[in-house]
Image (cartoon, grey):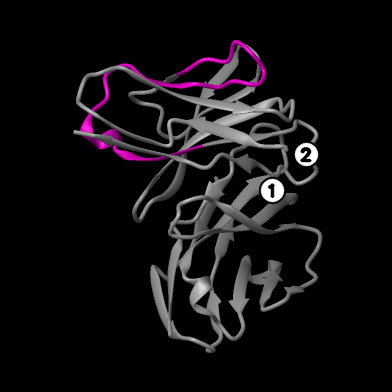
Amino acid sequence: EAQVTQNPRYLITVTGKKLTVTCSQNMNHEYMSWYRQDPGLGLRQIYYSMNVEVTDKGDVPEGYKVSRKEKRNFPLILESPSPNQTSLYFCASRSALAKYNEQFFGPGTRLTVL
Amino acid sequence: AQKVTQAQTEISVVEKEDVTLDCVYETRDTTYYLFWYKQPPSGELVFLIRRNSFDEQNEISGRYSWNFQKSTSSFNFTITASQVVDSAVYFCALSEARGNTPLVFGKGTRLSVIA
């Protein structure tokens, strides 16, 4: 089944404790991205990657890192999480040849930073 | 720059009423794509429809219909005979056709359908 998976789905952590949210897709998509969703703000892009070893900042990259060592994986790294990073995070992927730029979304990761 | 505006933050309707969710967008590109997503209380994003800028044909899918009007830069979504299961947050989104442009989302409209 074609899908984007994220782990963990739920995470409660404390300020300053490094964490990684994994994202994996099995569709051989070139393009992957991370969004965060906050009440009243919709979804905003954090980082994106056009292909392996190619990443770039989205609209709200501060406090996040990403890497793209393999085509299928695009982990989101919070080196020193803070309470303002409490949010719902979505990973998405799409093919570079996608006709409508249609993205496939993961199920979301709900992160709480205390 | 791209922008999507969903002016209605929250809407409440009684079951079986019709409801229209508004979406207005801004883009400088002539080729772009519009989307609607549903986010039920469980949190996942459910794709509903996509439309490209050259296709202004309205679409109907069961109780759902979409009205795309380039002249007013709007892509409105109507649910006919609403049901409790339609209660969710609905997002309108825009993507320009060129390369690595992200999906730009509106802030969402929370729809509550009351039995």
Residue beneath the point at 55% across and 22% down: A74
Return the residue nearer the eye: B93 or A107: A107
Residue beneath the point at 30% across and 34% down: A85
Q: Indicate the amino acid at tag 1.
A: Asp
Q: Secondary structure at mark 1?
A: loop
Residue A88 % position (x, y): 39, 42
Q: Quadrant of the C terminus of chain A?
A: top left
Among the 4 quarters of the image, the one containing residue B56: bottom right
| Residue where numbered disc 2 is placed | A98
Q: With A21 as the anchor, is A13 left or right in this view?
A: left
Return the residue nearer the eye: B42 or B14: B42
**Residue A101, above or below B107:** above
Do pointers 2 and 1 mark residues of a single chain?
no
| Residue where numbered disc 1 is placed | B29
The magenta region covers A66-90
**Residue A22, above or below B6:** above
Q: Indicate the amino acid at tag 2.
A: Ala
Among the 4 quarters of the image, the one containing residue B49: bottom right
Residue B57 % position (x, y): 80, 70
